[in-house]
Amino acid sequence: MTLIVELLTILAPVFLTAAVGYVWGLRRWSFNHAFVAEIIGKVSAPCLVFAALASAAVDPAALGTVALAMALCVVVFFAVGWVGLRALGMPVSVHLPPLITSNTGNMGLPVSLFAFGPEGLAYGVAIMATLSITCFTLNIWIASGKASPLEAVRQPAVWAAALGMAAATTGVELPRWLFNTTELIGGIAIPLMLIALGVSIAELEIRHLGRSVGLSLWRIGMGLAVGVAMAAAFGLTGAAAGVLILQASMPAAVFTFLFAQMYDQRPAEVAGTIVVSTLLSLITLPLILWAVLPA
């Protein structure tokens, strides 16, 4: 019973906040996706990243190790996804981005925070920053056929991560006004991301349900297997291992739909994978949390 209460404590805020966005989307109430994406991507998320890393009571080397482990997870996701999709005769440019990019932001950060506290948030932020680089380089290359390495450099969250890690590494004590400001602005990122996720899920349509279910199980199952293997390979334990496994096994990221739309890569099929994998996470996340939470 205690474990069930703990799982509810962790997951209820995540799914209920996303449900607010879902109902909002179903009612077709006004929701400016462009504005929300801009305010999160350019202001709130960078502040969250900076504040979480700069104030983390975690060894910066441990954060770097977890980030490296996640980067290697993406390499494995890419290799397995590329080979598997080619073998199945499915278009790589359409289906590979949602297979390799888990939702480490909208869902991953709040789950990491509620499951493991500030330490978990710091690890989650390090992983999200790593995936941001992937999202704006590798995914654009896959979807468009053109490499765009400078896109990652232009992302404020990447710079915020670098500054936060520098502050943590050097032991610089931030002025209280600066920390309070970044923490306050960063505090709106998680609820906004969850509400935006709910609205997006309400607006996306599922096409080719059977294929979407198969790809969703592939995304989550591959993420779980590779996350566990990487945690073991790097000797990670506790919150570091738990957050890596959780983040690797999240459903497909909503951003992959935007890239599919931008480059005309069958966005309806990508939307199906995002929606179905997110719905499946209602089942998979409690099971994964049960496995990774400390006894």
Image (cartoon, helix red, strand yellow):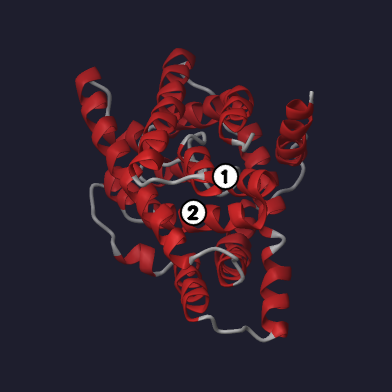
Q: Residue 14: in sight, yes or no?
A: yes
**Amino acid identity at mark 1:** Gly
Residue reaching furthest to the top: 210
* Residue 217 on image: x %, y %: 45, 21
Location of residue 56 by image quarter: bottom right
Q: Position of residue 112 (x, y in %)?
A: 61, 46
Labels 2 & 1 near each other (Cβ < 8 A): yes
- Vertical placement of 283 versus 166: above or below? above
Q: Left or right? Give the position of 258 relative to 146.
A: right
Choose between 127 and 144: the one closer to the eye.
127
Q: Position of residue 290 (x, y in %)?
A: 62, 28
**Residue found 60% across the figure and 56% down from its top:** 119
Any mark on residue 128, and which? 2
- The outermost residue toward the bottom is 175
Residue farthest along the front direction in this orientation: 295
Classify the position of the C terminus by image quarter. top right
